[in-house]
Image (cartoon, rainbow, N blue to C red):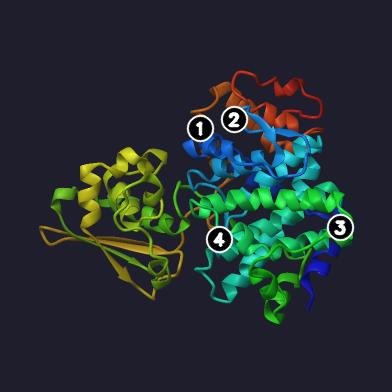
Amino acid sequence: MNVAPAVARFVTQSRLEGIAEPVGDEAVRALVDWLGCCLGGCLQPGVDAIGATRDDAPDGGEATLPGRGDRGGLGLTAMRSAVASDALDYAAIHAPSGAAVSVPIVAALLPLAQARAAAGADVIHAFVLGAELTCRLAQALSDAGRFDDRRAYAACGRIGAVVACGKLLGLDAARLEHAITVTASADTATGQAEGGDRDELACSARRALTVALHAERAPIHCFESPAGEPCLSERLEEPQHAAALLQGLGEEWHLARIAYKPYPCDNALHAVIEAGLRVRALHRPLARHVAQIELHVHPSVLVCAYTQIPSTAAQARRSLEHALAVALLDGTAGIEQFTDRRVASTRVAQLRLRIELRADERLPAAGAHVLLRTLDGRVLEHGVRCARGNPSRPLSDSELSDKFRELAAEVIATDQAERLLALTWNVRSLADIGALVRASVPDEAPDPAELPGSPLLAR
């Protein structure tokens, strides 16, 4: 079964009025979440490190990095936006697989939309299609048991991003098909970025944008797949993957399976944090009174080899022991709990070493159970089957707004953050998406109420 032509036809034939309102609402939620994450991470050192990267995207103009105001080529801005929005490991993912959804797609789509002065509704439409394909691809891999194939999941986001950019550019079915095929065959060409998964997402965003722009301009006979392993492209043609990808396309929306993170760390740590927070809230145990700590998780979580003794904030965001330690000691798990300073804390380090991991097949993959044995013989425990933010326990619009405010606080003033938040919730009313980015720049943002096509409606 040849998947690329079917996907290309679906995307090119999709019309904005054919997207159900709840699906569009979910896309807006994803944009609110992504923009907050981008603001929260835009001052991280990794963003500036991208400044020396060659921008190999075709000359499509310049775009602005949200929260910073720095202008650069589209490919460079896509990479920096991806690094910023993923710096705190706080952005939305596909819940069943853990694949990144919003980071590669919005990071590629937003600079292009700025350069083309695209309407907010068209950006949301393009995001819906790209995110839907990403979720379906990741679901197919997840169903095949490829939970540890992080490069393949990154490729899912890259293909979703090229679909979104292709839709915004108005590519016809033939050009979009070629763009999808080229992107799906690029696993090795873009999957060797130094710096691991985060740089790979940045390269994916730039690669998707570059391929889409080439597809718009180059003669169709000039398309060639880059040298490398045709890893994902071969899998797409396997009957079981093709069927999973195409079944119900346009009718059943996998976009509803996006998870929004309430904690700035790997999704596998969220149930651990909630179980630890609950034990603390119920029993208020003192660390010096605890004789033993057991953390029970599904075996698949342990297979992922999450860091046991972190030395950096990035490692702490993938450490089961650190997540539980800060939850028990601090009673919270926000940005401060995953900083280098907190990782180096003697109290946190000592408690991490006292945590023993246990594989428990009775728990779901998204669950965790914490058990504390005290010196006086008491047993304090609590289990979580599924953490908040998962589609079965979704964050509300109000909770997403609070997350946005927390992340924006270090970059822009409170009143500007409120105006930007209102503008983002009403992005579909924008005549030019550039107004949204301009409103994110500190001290230079125009009043959104004065921008054409951007009414501040109550949410």
Determine which residue is flagged by label 3.
Answer: 12
For the residues labelled 2 and 4, the Cα–Cα distance comes to 28 Å
Circle 3 crowding by C-alpha within 10 Å: few under 14, some 14–19, many from 20: some
Q: Name the residue under label 4.
A: 95
Drawn side of residue 59 relative to residue 327, left or right = right
In this view, the residue in front, 401 or 126, is 126
> Which tag, 2 or 3, sits closer to the chain's start?
3
Q: Which of marks 1 and 2 is nearer the N terminus?
A: 1
Report which residue position mark 1 lands on. Answer: 43
Q: Which amino acid does label 1 sit on?
A: Leu
Q: Do the residues labelled 2 and 4 touch (CB within 8 Å)?
A: no
> Label 2: few (<14), some or many (≥20) within 10 Å?
many
Q: Quadrant of residue 62 in the image? A: top right
Per the image, the residue denoted by label 2 is 67
Of mark 2 and mark 4, the one earlier in the sequence is 2
Mark 3 to mark 4: distance in Å?
A: 27 Å
Of 49 and 378, nearer the camera is: 49
Residue that appears at 73% across and 54% down: 162
